[in-house]
Amino acid sequence: MEDPKADAPDLDVVDDDLIDDEIGGRGIDADTILDSLVPQSIDWRETVGRHPMLSVASVGLVGYLVGRTKGASIMAGITAGLSAGIMRQLSGVFEEEFFDF
């Protein structure tokens, strides 16, 4: 008797490929981040579903506290990243024969 799972695709590989495509295509979504941060033993989707207001309040409090304590560092990092991205875009424009006088 043949194994029916022998021809079936490996779902772990397919899922990893889909996640890689999602990350490369449009960035990381909240589910991916939470799945990597929260231990596997905790079903955070069910917890948020049962206590949505408490979840929103908790996330708001954590965001407020992080902003108050690390806000300057976060803004410096965002500014540096934006500056680097803008400079990369401008260097590509100036390297081409765009301004041909």
Image: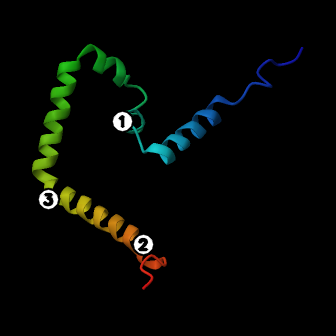
Q: Which mark is residue 30?
A: 1
* Amino acid tagged 1: Ala
User: Which residue is label 3 attached to?
Assistant: 72
Residue type for callout 2: Val
Badge 1 crowding class, 10 Å Cα cut-off, few under 14, some 14 to 19, many 20 or more, is few
**Marks 1 and 3, how far apart at CA:** 24 Å
Q: Is residue 79 left or right of residue 40?
A: left
Indicate the secondary structure of the residue bearing disc 1.
helix
User: Under tag 2, what secondary structure?
Assistant: helix
Label whose residue precedes the other's in the sequence (1 or 3):
1
To which quarter of the image does residue 65 belong?
top left
Question: Residue 95: percent from the left, percent from the top?
Answer: 46, 78
Q: Residue at x 39, y 38 (%)?
A: 29
x, y percent for residue 33: 38, 39
Q: Amino acid at mark 3?
A: Ala
Which quadrant of the structure image shows residue 80? bottom left
Q: Residue at x 12, y 41 (%)?
A: 64
Residue 55: x and y, percent? 22, 25
Label 3's element?
helix
Furthest residue in direction right, as rendered: 1
User: Which numbered tag is attached to residue 93?
Assistant: 2
